[in-house]
Amino acid sequence: MSSALTTIELDWQARRRTRRAATLWYGALLLCAIAISAYVSEVFPETLARGLPQIGVYFRKLVPALTWDHLFDGPKTEGAIAYWFYRLDSWGWMLFETTQIAALATLFGACGALLGCFGASANLAPNRATYLICRRILELFRTVPDIVYALILVYALGVGPPAGIFAIALHTTGALGKLFAEVVENADMRPWDGVRAAGGTWLHGVRFAILPQVLPNFLSYLLLRFEINVRGSTVIGFVGAGGIGQELYLVIAKNYYDEIGAIIALIILTVAFIDIVSERLRSRVIGT
Amino acid sequence: MQHSTLDLRDLTRRFGPKLAVDGVSLSVPPGQMLGILGRSGAGKSTLLRMINRLIEPTAGSIRYGDIDVTALKGKPLRDWRTACAMIFQQFNLIPRLDVLSNVLMGRLNHRATLPSLLGRFSAAERAMALQALERFDLLETALVRAGQVSGGQQQRAAICRALLQQPQLLLADEPIASLDPHNARVVMDALRRINQEDGITVLCNLHHIDTARSYCDRIVAMQSGRIVFDGPPADLTPERVRDIYGVSEDEFHSTAMPDGTLALA
């Protein structure tokens, strides 16, 4: 082997040694960090070992005593599905209310996100100040949990759906705004140059060069957010912001296990239904 | 705006430590078809983009008659861009909109903001767009999405968009670098036509010496951001090319065209 080749070979080996040492060092560091966070958040193996079976016990309580013989009987017979879901009419209405809270909140939040996202994109913001201000505002909306907004708004607007709608809308503006801005930052800028070079304004550029490109992705994120908000609006109900959450909170507080199970089953079914429908919609829009 | 001479004085653009355009002074009289020649990275694109202010100059001035282009802002700047249309190597159309709507983008600055944002254009403007499309043999593509027509058709649609701006100048940034030889010729013919029939001043960045020679009234050659030749095509002899670039014309082309695009006859 020539001396040049030997030098490169030695160089390569030296680099590999450095890389391995680095991997070990950072691996150890990561393990330490995990251990510290487990200690701080009190996640100990023995607590988990003691606690986990309890979860199973709770879930077993949620499953009602259904019997084969009476499964499809009327709501007055014990062991029938209809008996388990004896308040299906009012639960169904409350669940519908919850999805409507989520739908309106997603719509309002998406409008806010649409207004903020273009200024918060590094490639479109007319200047650095606009970019930083839009980013910070979206961050502010996003970092405060929706349940905190809900508590404030229930205090201000009183108990009921409007508080829930605005609480979730505020959080959605921040969360969707950031995602929208990232989509915009990945947009192809050549049409933008074309529109701007033709004497179009900033708004013309957004409307004609950017919006047609990003709209399918916006819709996809919007549908995902809608699903998240259906779950979110359930939890929001706990603090008096309307919907099925209020009822769920009540039956959990009173340990009505059959009711808890029935309501959770209904929520899972609803979310699954929304997931299927929105997946269809999404693939149709993106497919074109 | 009156047809005037475009005057560049010591125009300079710096990207970090690199001088992309280095003290370029150039005077372009109305109605001229000017070819700007140079290899990749010679500063041709930066120069053209500074003229319509897609890129801000670091130093120097751009004047058009008594307009100080470098100082324009807001509406006057948009008016300048409207008067000084641009076409691009990658066409820069909106792929999801049909060809007709793309061509109508040239009218954005001629209408009030609200109707133009809603995409509302007058029947006269649509007629104007259709006439432009017909003139360049694109009428049958009018309602097809721009992303679905060929590169040559897209570039001609971009020329139609430029024409709808009713410009006095046209900046063409490598208009044929992404096209095959046949389409390249069709597009260069179109540029020559609007230069001669409409009296539009054309500044055209080109890779290829032969194209510049056969289509332009005047050739400016650039290297490392500076002008190294300025004169009629007849003066840019193979000997001059060798003097300027230190390589023969063939070698110039083989290094100038990294994408392997074929030479124009």
Image: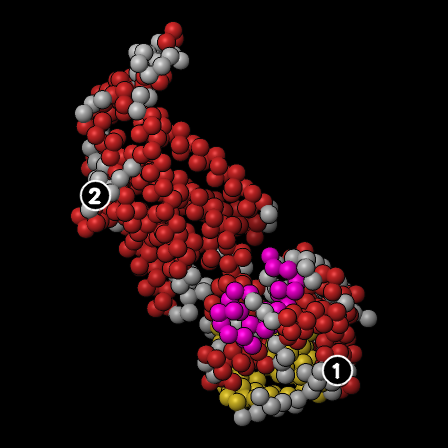
Q: Disc 1 sits on a residue from what chain?
A: B
| Viewer-proximal residue among A57 and A5 | A57
Could you say where residue B141 lies in the image, as x and y percent from the top left?
72, 61
- Of B74 and A73, the residue lying toward us: A73
Residue in the image at 26% along x and 30% along y:
A248
Compared to A184, does A238 lie above or below? above
* Residue B112 is inside the magenta segment: yes
Q: Main secondary structure of the magenta part?
A: helix
User: Would residue B43 be seen by someone viewing this image from the given angle?
Assistant: no
**x, y percent for residue B98:** 64, 60
Q: Quadrant of residue B22?
A: bottom right
Which mark, residue A64?
A: none
Identity of the amino acid at label 2? Val
Above or below residue A44? Residue A17 is below
Q: Position of residue A131 (x, y in %)?
A: 37, 64
Q: B66 left or right of A221?
A: right
Residue at 53 percent across and 72 percent down: it is: A200
Q: Is residue A94 above or below residue A102?
A: above
Q: Is residue B65 left or right of residue A203?
A: right
Mark 1, other Cα within 10 Å: few <14 / some 14–19 / many ≥20: few
Disc 1 from disc 2: Cα separation: 73 Å
Residue placed under numbered mark 2 in the picture:
A159
- At horizontal 54% and vertical 59% (from top left) the residue drawn is A188
The residue at which mark 1 appears reads as: B197
Q: Is residue A77 above or below residue A121?
A: above
Which amino acid type corresponds to the residue marked 1 in the rendered image?
Glu
Residue located at (21% from left, 36% from top) = A41
